[in-house]
Amino acid sequence: MDRPPGSAYRSSCVKLYLCSNPEDSTVERNALRKSVFPKLRQHCRHTRGLDVRVIDPFEASDSSRWPDEQTRQQLINECRDSSAGPFLLALIGHQYGKAELPTQVEVSEFQVLLQESQQAKISTQEVEGQYWRDENTIPPSFCLRPRRSTCCPQQSEVKKEEKLKPKPEDDGLRRLFQTTVSRCVHKDLLSSDRAQRYYRSVLDVDLRFALENQPKHDIAGRCLVYIHKVINAKGEKEKRMNSQIQPQPESTSESTDGKLLSHLCDSFLPGLITSSQLLVYTMATECDHRHGYTTAKRRTYAQSLCQQVYADVLRLIDNVNISETSESAHIGDALAIEQEEQEELCKILSSFYEIIRPEEEKIRAYVQQREQQRPLVVVGGPCTGKAVLLAHCAQKIKSWLPDSDPVVFTYFLNLSNNLSPKHLLLSLCSQIASQYHHSRSLTGRNLLDDPSCSNNNSNCSLVSNLDPHERTTGDHVSHCCEDLSVEPYQHHSGIINTDLCLSELKEHFSSLLSLMPSTKNPLFLIFDGLDHVNYTVGPQIIESLPSPLPPNVKVLLTVSAKRTQILQAMDPQSPACEISEGREESGYECVALGLADRKQCVRMLASLLSRSGRSVTSGQQALVNQSLTSCCLPLYARLLHLHTSCWHSDSDVTYSSLPDGVHSSICALLDHLEHKHGSSLVVRALSYLTLSRTGLTEAELSDLLSSDDKVLLEYVQQNETPSSDVKVPQVDVETFLVDLRSFLTLRTVKGSKVLFWVSRHFKLAVTKRYLGSHDLRTEIHSAMADYFSGQWAHGITKPSLANQKSLPNKETAHIAPYTDWQPFIFASSLKDIGRVNLRKVLELPHHLQESNKWEKLEVGLLLSLRFHQAMVRAGLLGNLLAMLEDEQGSSHWRCSRERGLVANILKSCACFLQSSPLQLPTVMETSLFPYLEVFPALRGFFREIREERRKRGSGLGVVLCPLPSVVPSIHCLKSNFAVREVSVTEVAGNDCGMVAMIMDDGTAWFWKGSGFDVVKLLLSWEKSKLKFAGLKSSGPYILLFTRCNKLFCWDVTGPEVFVQLNAESESKDPTSNIIDGFVACQKKLFIWFKEESFVRMFDVCSETVTHFQCQSCVTCLVCSSTSLYMCCGQQDGTVSIFDTNTLSLLGTCSDSKRDPVTLIILCEDKWEMACVDRTGNLTLWDVTAKTQPPRFVKKILSYGKSDNILNTDYSEEINTLLVCQSHLVTLWDTCDWEPWDKFLSPQGRAFTHAVLSQDGHLFLALLDTCPFVLVWRVSTGECVLSLETNEQPHTLLKTASDIICVAPDGCLTVWDAEMIDAAGASPTMRSRVKELVAGQTGDWFYTTDGSEVVWRWSLKTGVPDANLLHEGPVKKLRLSPDDLHLVTLSAGDIYVWQTEMGQNILRLSGSGASDVLITPNNNFGISLSDQSLSRVWKLAHGSIVCSIHLYLSDAQVSHESTFLIGRRGGDLLAASLWSGSINKRFSCVESSEHVVAFQTLSHPDFVVVMGASGAVYTWNVAEETVCKHFQLPYVFHCQPQDFQMSCDGNYALLSTDNDSINLLNLSWLVLCSLKAEGPVIRACLDKTGCYTAYISSSAPQEESCVCSLHVRPILTVVRLADGERIGSVFLPKQPLTLVVCKCVFVGFEDGSVGVYSISDILNTQVEPVGCSDPVGSKVKQCPFDRTPVGWLPLTSPNVTWP
């Protein structure tokens, strides 16, 4: 292969040809095969993403199955051309080897040899018997007759010891040839060079073929040769035996072999070392002359050889520049790679264009016609070469248009990985935008992005070669972008919006086609196979094309003659069966592709035969011509080449010898392969290849065959004991693939070279022949699923063949598979870096689905962190989202809600994850933590996150998650056919989860709940489509009424059958035909119309209609549970009660105010009837007596504004009624019918809709001009949550398990009701967290918001378990070091709490304290007062020890609890805790320097002091000595408000400066600055000196970027010892407090708290025991029932100080 030096190898496999003398290398080859090659393969897969295959032509123990010289040369060429790096590994021992019989001798040369033999009186009978003349070879030659070798290994009955023994007839022929050749050379009848072929061994022949006359770059660094010279190889005993039994000619032969071996090692190879830098290693082994080369010596050499080979091959592979698929996190990169693969595919297919088709000129004419604005369709039958023709034309377009620079995109959809219309349109839009900006600007990273991110200043990418704040485009492109608003989709960052619906993509695609192409850069879109993919894909792509096509846009596509749905989509007016060229009125140009010219097919066949060194006789040619006359297809001609290349000149062939068509030819080819390679191998190999999703690599095919019991059983010899390490030899797989290389070739898929059929007909033929059974297809898919999941077929491990054969019906021993052979991400030596196993990612989901392993697919993949990591890191986030949202096989799914939740979380973080894919575990942990109790199925996902962090050795974990700021939805549903101008007019839902919508264009849309998409309802009446006017819902029924006054009812629990109801209004006014209400009860449907005074009852069972007449217009209706009684509320405030069986009026009641009745609630257990009028007044009636009018009980008036009721929500289970008015939401207790609570709307806003949560602890409401759904907690009246929607909501619906927000355009956003409850119940303080203290034991921590309550939180449960009550606002919290006492300062009193017993043991008054301290020995408290005396007192009973007269600011207690140290007047003073006197002072009198900060240390009586000038001192308080250690530079001056220090004095946090944290390492006197992601908000130093934690704002993003994570603050923990970042977590809201004490504690402005654990393997830091596994089994408890215990304070102070 002509590869220039230094170029990258585009292969994904290192393929080594093992060249050796089979008679002298068995031990060495076996050792390499067992100990080196598997280890080498494992290493290369994990570190370089490469596979390793070693082709040993002599791997089979039966020499009759060894490949001949021609096959070996094909294998060498294959390794040379397709290996990514080294391709040759040669082992040269001390034996040269037997000369190989020539397989082919030219006629003239063979006749010279025969003549010379006859003259020498040498019998030629044996030679003439073994060789026969074949005129079909080029040149005509005598060929060695093939050996009678069976195709199946187990059919061979040759004994093991005879397999490697040379056959006597071969030795005789070899001696005859060599003797005759010597005579010919002596007589100058044959050149000496030509004569060498009769003497050279297999080793010599292969080496010379691989190395001789090859370019330097194909040898240097690609070939390894190992020479082993053995001195005294033959011992004395062996020499004596040989001298006695060997005749003289053998000695002559050995002498010749020795010379040839010497020439090979001492002349040929050294020459290549000099000229081509061939790597040759020589080793000498000296043997004892008595024993010779023993088995022990050989094994020793084999061991050293293995070590050397492993090191050398590894070094060569590591030195090779391998072109790899970038593992970018950008979806745009993945789409660009897909397009590169399509371009490569186009080149491969165009290489098959060898017959010039006249249709090419028609296509050329279309390409060159500028005025043509219709697509060109190439129509043809199967195997006519449509794809090859278009691929060839695609390569020619640029030469056809020399004056322009056309942009050409090809899509061969039969060979594409993702066939969804959304993905195809996304790819088209991305590539068009990217290519046109690339051709006119300095960057090619302009891709589709989130429409919300329309600013050009994106800097989301990890790597950028340009200033991210610049954009340069051509002038005419700039104005197009202004008109089109392309910028929202195109960014230098490469971030692509994954949440675009199909209709949005269609619109954008059409816009791009209209505005991007130009005369200079016309656009050509070429599609092949649109009619062979899913029947909805092709028409949807065609519908996306503007009609007519915009100028400078050309579309070419292929259509099979019998598949006309694509033509119908382009020209709906033409008959489906009519296909004609040149029809002007049609919507497309048509080119009919017929049969190829027979003469050209004949010429192509002759050319193919010539290239393979074959020809046919004239008689055989006549048969070929006759066959091509009946079937003149290019594919058929290529198949004929394989058949005719097997013919010999004396072959007895007739017309029936040739298959009569493509399918028959393929079947004949398969028959030939089965005979040659064995039926099982061929059947299983072709089955695996055909059923793979993207194709298989050669290594994968070999692995699958080696784990297939049906194939392996053929390799167990009948006379051999089965072995557990039996596998298919690589050479058998390789020779099989070589025989199919004309039709099974390699292409690139995600960086791997995979095998694929160049013609779709091969797949069809293989499927029909081998895969006709569904069970068989399932078996193959299951085997591939097991392989790609890292298992062997038929179980966790592969069964031992030995045991399987002997005990077929019993459980047997197993051999272990490779350890972690198929991980999602290959391990790497670099931290957090690995290689995505793209082959597993692409293949495994497909095979799990096809083998019906739905649980493994859903739980093992779709809800697996490792699978998500692989997909995101590979840039396949869009594919992952599509898989999570795909509802194919919805009946098998069990976790559709969980998948929907995960999908929406990924969508909300898509921008961030595309730029930072390694942050996925952290993002998902913080997002999923609050909802683990709601979705137990996600516990496995969460457990994987924890395992990932433990495996990584560092990171931040969630211990206590704060109140989520946003509750993620589980579904966000858009109609793909929705038009932006259409809006919702009416919507309804029911408890079955069904949602129905009527749009203002008269269409009806339905959503059946989780697991389904939004679908459009199409009903026809008298051949016309019905348009709908409205709908109602009640119970399981949905009622639809049309604009033509038709009524249809559907029971959603039954089949999808719409029953027409004959219940039209009696009014002649069309406006009165609008249905005002609908109630379903016990198979009876009650319907009333707007402004009508009657109710119609429709009996579903009897199909009868009954009328009930009321006094005035009906406004509402309710039925008893048995449907026996019906109560009708009316416009005049009257309620009429009917008996539905007798149709009689039982009674009426009315309110004195006569306000219209809006709602009636019938409580059958008490037989009470509550009526709510239009303004919210409630009247209660007793309806116990059925035969008498209802009895008035009471009336409750609604005070305030008399607004009309907007909606009501009644929950019988929780006895609560919600009444929503514009200014007020009222909750009623329906047990005693009293108002429970009232909630006023925010000032200046009005409610538009409200519903109760699932358990009634919350209610959700919509406000006018507010794009959120707001959630209030009923118990506190606080608005605790906001649910995000894409636009102003239209209405809210509540089902049994969901809350659904309907947007005006019909988009549905669905939240799980339990998730809202869980988020709404998250404990929060009333106000912002002002102070937080944590204990050393890690069991509890305490928070205050400045109110009279202190909360104690339990880390084990994650919720507050106690409230410490005070009689005034709490100002200070102090926890004793032993965690036994908590001291609080509230309203001037000091409270001392005993934390274990929960008692307030002391309440001290009269202190006048502004702060309190606790001494390190836990014995004393110190009250600090800036107005009066500071006092030292005993913590146990409050008695005063001493008083300190001076106030010391920033006071601290020394470690020994002997001094109180603080600043005063610029000096540092120390007061004795026993006497209260100031007896120590630190003062810098000489420099007049003020003390700005200080810190006591754990070292006794030592204090670190920071001066105003930046000087750093240590002060020994007891000895009153001072030492100046350091002078800070000006830029590192200490900021007192930020200053912190570790207890051991090793580290000090000096200041925070914008986005930097300045630290001082006192032990090494080193200054360092940590760079944060943005401005630092808070920073905290761990007192142990291990870590520093800081909270920073996110890096500035585009002004319009709304990615949820890009605006959140970030908590980061850094290890101080080496500056290594332990981990980062995005915080959900604005933080106020930060504390590091074993864990990291964060208090937020909304009163919630977050706790995060630090995992660090270097510091043996582990997560807290209580929260290390929050995914364990817990008893599910209502979150609102978790009420903390109240700790009451002492009613009055028990200690009063004077």
Image (tube, helix red, strand yellow):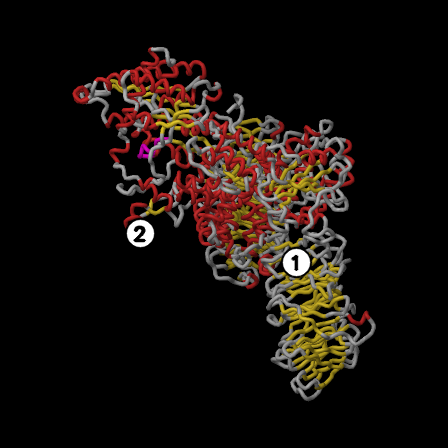
Residue at label 2? 808
**Which stretch did the figure color magenta?**
57-64
Question: Residue 420: x percent and y percent?
Answer: 61, 47
Q: Is residue 939 above or below residue 444?
A: below
Looking at numbered disc 1 in the image, what kind of residue is underneath it? Val
Viewer-proximal residue among 903 and 615: 615
Front-lying residue, 409 or 1471: 409
Q: Residue 636: tell me if it is visible.
A: yes
Quadrant of the rendered structure where residue 61 is?
A: top left
Q: Residue furthest right?
A: 1069
Q: CA distance from mark 1 to mark 2?
A: 53 Å
Which is nearer the eye, 18 or 1179?
Answer: 18
Rendered image quadrant of residue 652: top left
> Is 1367 situated above or below 389?
below
Residue occupied by mark 1? 1015
> In the rendering, at what x and y percent does residue 1663 appear?
47, 47
Earlier-in-chain disc, 1 versus 2: 2
Q: Is residue 81 magenta?
A: no
Q: Which type of secondary structure does the marked residue at label 1 adopt?
A: strand
Question: Tags 1 and 2 in contact by the CB under 8 Å rule?
Answer: no
Q: Residue at x 74, y 63 (%)?
A: 1024
Relative to 1461, 226 lies left or right: left
The answer to whether residue 1575 is visible is no
- Residue 1360 place in picture, x, y as percent: 54, 57
The nearer-to-camera label among 1 and 2 is 2
Q: Considering the numbered disc 2 on the image, is that residue within a helix, a strand or a loop? A: loop
Q: Main secondary structure of the magenta part?
A: loop
Q: Position of residue 1135 (x, y in %)?
A: 73, 80
| Residue 178 in the image: above or below residue 1190 | above
